[in-house]
Amino acid sequence: MKRMASLLWPVAFLSSFAWCQSATVPRLEFDHTTVYVRDLNKSGEFYDKVLALQRIDEPFHDGRHIWYRIGTHDQLHVVSGANSAENHDINVHLAFRVADVPDFTSRLQQMGIPYRKSIRGDGKTATLRPDGVHQIYFQDPDGYWIEVNDDKF
């Protein structure tokens, strides 16, 4: 009996392992990200004018939310209520694609928006990733970092 139990243990273990492997894992898809801001109107104006994002209807209608379409099924939620600006690390950022980074950089210059040409400092040219994509970085009114690049995806 003891020998039979020791022979069945691997079978039971492998059966349970196979069940775990075959269990359906839900496929996750990105839905939205949120920035928590001090001044909703100032942030809304920034995302409207600097990034020219498309506003979409938000369900709360409480004057504390602005929602933007940032992809086919992706959204940016801007929510008011923050008491102070936080020091956000540049490595945590929103990233958007454009066809021409120098053209977008000119737009920022015309609007008086300071930007960085490198994630590590203020280099002379836009950062060129190993895959050939150019990048620039700038901040929204609450200090959230935004990258704009020319990835061809």
Image: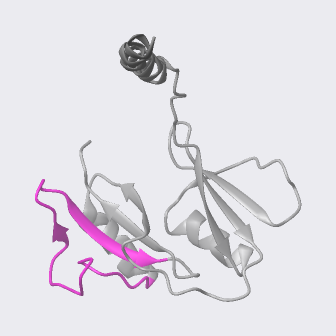
Give the image quarter of residue 122. Answer: bottom left
Number of callouts? 0
Q: Nearer the viewer, residue 73 or 49?
A: 73
Q: Quadrant of the N terminus?
A: top left
Query: In the rendering, at what x and y percent does residue 90 appear?
Result: 38, 77
- Asked if residue 131 is among those painted magenta in the image, a careful observer would answer yes
Query: In the rendering, at what x and y percent does residue 145 appear?
Result: 44, 74
Give the image quarter of residue 6. Answer: top left
Residue at the farthest right position: 62
Q: Is residue 47 left or right of residue 137?
A: right
- Asked if residue 117 is among those painted magenta in the image, a careful observer would answer yes
Residue in view at x 89 percent, y 61 percent? 62
Q: Nearer the viewer, residue 72 or 90?
A: 90
Residue at the farthest front position: 1
Residue in view at x 28 percent, y 65 percent? 103
Residue in view at x 67 percent, y 64 percent? 78
Residue 105 vs 2, above or below: the answer is below
